[in-house]
Image (spheres, coloured by chain):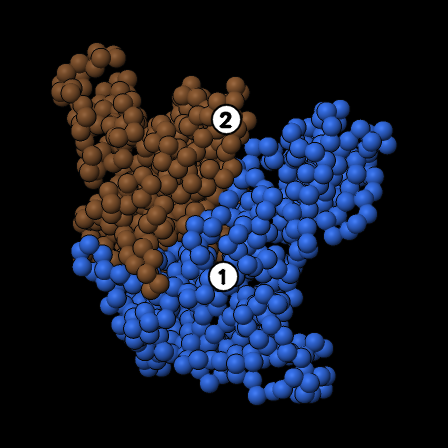
Chain colours: A brown, B blue
Amino acid sequence: MLQSKIFSKTLREDPKDEVSTNAKLLERGGFIYKTMAGVYDFLPLGWRVLNKINNIIREEMNAVGGQEIFLTAMQPRERWEKTGRWKLLGEEVMYQFKDRFGHEVGLASTHEEAVTEIATRFIQSYKDLPLAVYQIQTKYRSESRAKSGLIRGREFLMKDLYSFHATTEDLDRYYKLVDESYLKIFKRCGLKTFVTEASGGVFSKDFSHEYQVLSDAGEDKIIFCSQCGFAQNKEISSLDEGGDCSKCGNKLKVGKSIEVGNIFKLGTKFSDAFGLYYTDKEGGKKPVIMASYGIGPGRLMGTIVEIHSDEDGILWPEEVSPFKIHLIALGDKAKNEAENLYKDLLAENIEVLYDNRGDKTPGEKFSDADLLGIPWRVVVSEKTMEKKGVELKKRDEKQAKIITIQELLKIK
Amino acid sequence: MLQSKIFSKTLREDPKDEVSTNAKLLERGGFIYKTMAGVYDFLPLGWRVLNKINNIIREEMNAVGGQEIFLTAMQPRERWEKTGRWKLLGEEVMYQFKDRFGHEVGLASTHEEAVTEIATRFIQSYKDLPLAVYQIQTKYRSESRAKSGLIRGREFLMKDLYSFHATTEDLDRYYKLVDESYLKIFKRCGLKTFVTEASGGVFSKDFSHEYQVLSDAGEDKIIFCSQCGFAQNKEISSLDEGGDCSKCGNKLKVGKSIEVGNIFKLGTKFSDAFGLYYTDKEGGKKPVIMASYGIGPGRLMGTIVEIHSDEDGILWPEEVSPFKIHLIALGDKAKNEAENLYKDLLAENIEVLYDNRGDKTPGEKFSDADLLGIPWRVVVSEKTMEKKGVELKKRDEKQAKIITIQELLKIK
């Protein structure tokens, strides 16, 4: 893509009304635009990143047999009365209003009610189980605090997976499978997570599990063992900082963290509310056992920026970067050479952002490159042409080196 | 995909509360689920179709230089006051409510205001023009009538493209380009459209253009020439049925039709309202000239079903079909053979739905195949095995024929 043609431009100053690192850098880089507190638009660069994250999630959800669906945000009150959550969530986070026809409508902040009602149409027998469906879809939450950029939104994308089982053993098997899938997703996004025991809420005496990333930008607090990875949410933990880890004996630490995902055994709460029963092999009627599993792709994007950034800008992990290479032409004499290299890279299917702007100084181009955070910076200038090569620098390294174009085309 | 494992199942009866053909067939086939009037969930099969349509649109939008973005549904009142559309659309179709913090919020039914405001941050000079951005995103419209299934929704996906130009000549050039792009999209979706002159509304004395598909399920009426393709929306036309086409002399006809897309010159209405100006070569300050271009992918899906269906079910055009081949195994003896063929087809990257269900009669399987509407039906049975082949039937033909597996693997 030609940098001169991108819809967005970088900003010189931090936006005045943002306090979080992720919002400041993403807005300055032209990745996002703030429409309201907690409500962000994704511009071409930001949408590219978000889609890379979505596609990682999609691949891993498909790998555990998830079937993709797309449910509606608008919800009738009647549906949510069945679980008592119309009132409960209405008081907390659910946007609710009357439409012009007098119907009471809510905007979904989660989809257990919807998916359970739909499942009653299709699940009748043990032969129909297990099943898992997921979506990547916009959720709405009327959050009182919305100052953490993409980390806590009022309108945000969510990947929510729901699974349906005949037995708790089968639920446990699948829950473990999704746990592994989640760890793959976060690793591919360049994040180290602690699988953290948390409250099972009204659903279960078991723990639920949160995927927490240590960060001062976090709104959670976990007690964790950096040796074996054991962790509990401080909200439910009876353990103390400096105490011994019961699993490995190492000293426990406490830290602020961002919850990037959670997995939750729902038991039969929703099945009972909607009459989601199946007939077992013996002809008996039993409630379906359910679980739900969430990841916020936008929150993940914000977290990646919190973790992978420095004073100059973002450092995207390669798999989620909007482009692999940031190609920069310096000076008129390098223009042809850079142009040809751009075409060669495209021909090799290497994703490249080409800074072809004629009205920017080298300093401006370099500081934009640092801000945008593409992993590989390639400079073509009169100087590099004399050396019969291009200058290659990784975003996270200080030192650049000269390599030949043939070498560059092989860095896939 | 294994048919026994799909989340949805086909229904024997038409849903009671639907009158439109598209909603009846899509709901019976398990493509969609109705949450409220005009508010439909997409189940795995339906989501596959919708994504095929989205991807066709995306390819064609990228081909005309559109940059993909993703704007928010939630909108602050203040933004829409600038064009006077808070009141205007609020009285017609815009969902509006107060959040718990007292802010007045609307759900976007269109995004001219948002995109123009955002553009003021990035467009300053004639060098920044032209530009085009688009999104595929969920829109909300508080429609009084919502009885046409996917054709008129209260919550629905929309592809909206916005273009920005320095001169009307450049706008006209791009408008023509998008017109051609739209014709490609509809053709790839198996639809014949009339490019129909319609009102330019408050924006322009020029016509806007609608893409109309003749159908009794339509809510529009056009007067058209079936010879040269000239058409006008009856709302603005002064021509009469049976009169002569001014372009080719053929007799004009009148018919009901579905509007599947429209393109619209906006002029400077939004630029003026938001102060979207650019500096021209001489240093003068001028308003940016804009246009907007819409297609509803869900409405397109509904229209395809209205046009391509018979009394037994849907006939998906190949490019939007959820699968290319519907493979059906009949009888226990054919199971191994069908299973192997399924694997071979997958290995060839041919999209195949495999009806491996053991508890269905041949009649049930065939009628499900007709309902689901996948273009190529392939049957493996004891009979076909004796003939050393498989039975191939196109959904739109009566006659089946026996071909070899080698021949089948070549039908890409």
Describe the element under mark 1 as helix, strand or loop. Answer: loop
Closer to us: A84 or A93: A84
**Which residue is pictured at 86% across the width and 32% down the height?**
B387
In the rendered view, does A90 fall on the left or right side of A272? Answer: left
Looking at the image, do the residues carrying marks 2 and 1 touch, with CB atoms under 8 Å apart?
no
**Left or right: where A376 falls relative to A350:** left
| Residue A156 visible to the viewer | no
Q: Which of B349 and B326 is in front in this view?
A: B326
Q: Quadrant of residue B300?
A: bottom right
- Coordinates of residue B6 in the picture (x, y in percent): 55, 36
Give amino acid for label 2. Answer: Thr
Observer-nearest of A198 and A94: A94
- Residue B307: x %, y % from top left: 64, 61
Q: Which chain carries label 1?
A: B
Identify the disc placed on residue A59: none
Quadrant in the picture for the C terminus of chain B:
top right
Q: Which of A334 and A327 is in front in this view?
A: A327
Location of residue A305 in the rendering, given as x and y in whole percent from the top left corner: 29, 43
- Circle on res. A279: 2
What is the quadrant of residue B323 in the picture?
top right
* Residue B35 x/y as whole percent: 43, 50
Q: Name the residue under label 1.
A: B147
User: Which quarter of the figure has residue B364?
Assistant: top right
Residue under the image location 38 percent in, 75 percent down: B288
Mark 2 and mark 1, same subunit? no
Tell me the amino acid under the disc marked 1: Lys
Question: Can residue B257 be seen here?
Answer: yes
Q: Is mark 2 on a helix, strand or loop?
A: strand
Where A61 falls versus A324 (above or below)? above
Badge 2: how crowded within 10 Å, few (<14), some, or many (20+)? some
